[in-house]
Image (cartoon, helix red, strand yellow):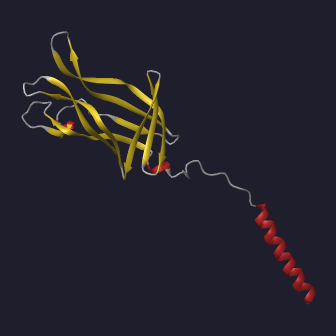
């Protein structure tokens, strides 16, 4: 009887060892993002362009600190963050153009921007090359929003007589995940 107990115990240990050793390391499912970055992947559209200096670009008599209330030039700006840590963004905005004598406010559309992104804590870095120069924009991630803050940036405004002018202001550009 002792022999059967020892044989059974030995067999149990051998079986357990074989089961543990026979398990292969399974490859990670590529759909599972172990880096924790999957929460930021997606499409974001501009929802606010806030400036510390209110402007009245549409000259309706009411100045606003959210430039989206003053012009449609920024409408449709987006950032697309892909799962492979690449991104695409468009660049639409407002500028002052001159024909030699008169200055006017005009909307512009630049070519799409492509680059890479990385996330560290709540800081999202978008790195891209434009005209041969590398840039990195740092966004703050909060829930479903990305905020790009620019201290002492340049915005377009108008004088009391309606003439376009460049102004210095602190800027917060907010994109919201769709």
Look at 79% across and 63% down and name the residue there.
Answer: 21
Q: Is residue 79 above or below residue 162?
A: below
- For image coordinates 18% across by 40% down, the residue present is 65
* Residue 177 location, quadrant: top left
Q: Residue 97 versus residue 3: which sits nearer the camera? A: 97
* Total marks in image: 0
Residue 169 x/y as whole percent: 24, 36
Furthest toward the top, the residue is 100
160 and 95: which is toward the camera: 160
Q: Position of residue 115 (x, y in %)?
A: 47, 32
* Quadrant of the image containing the N terminus: bottom right
Residue sitting at 79 percent across and 71 percent down?
16
Query: Could you tell me if residue 88 is visible in this image?
Result: yes
Vertical side of 146 occupied by 91: above or below: above
Q: Position of residue 34 (x, y in %)?
A: 56, 53
What residue sits 21% from the left and 37% below the top?
A: 68
């Amino acid at each position: 009887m002792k022999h059967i107990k020892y044989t059974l115990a030995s067999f149990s240990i051998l079986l357990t060892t074989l089961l543990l050793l026979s398990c292969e390391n399974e490859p990670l499912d590529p759909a599972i993002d172990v880096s924790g970055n999957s929460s930021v992947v997606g499409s974001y559209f501009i929802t606010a362009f806030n400036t510390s200096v209110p402007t009245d670009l549409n000259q309706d008599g009411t100045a606003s600190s959210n430039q989206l209330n003053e012009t449609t030039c920024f409408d449709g700006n987006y950032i697309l963050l892909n799962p492979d840590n690449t991104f695409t963004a468009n660049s639409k905005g407002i500028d002052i153009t001159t024909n030699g004598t008169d200055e006017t406010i005009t909307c512009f559309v630049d070519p799409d921007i492509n680059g890479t992104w990385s996330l560290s804590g709540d800081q999202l870095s978008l790195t891209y090359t434009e005209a041969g120069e590398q840039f990195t924009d740092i966004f703050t991630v909060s829930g479903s929003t990305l905020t790009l803050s620019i201290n002492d940036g340049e915005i377009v405004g108008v004088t009391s007589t309606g003439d376009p002018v460049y102004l210095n202001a602190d800027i917060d550009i907010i994109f919201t995940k769709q």
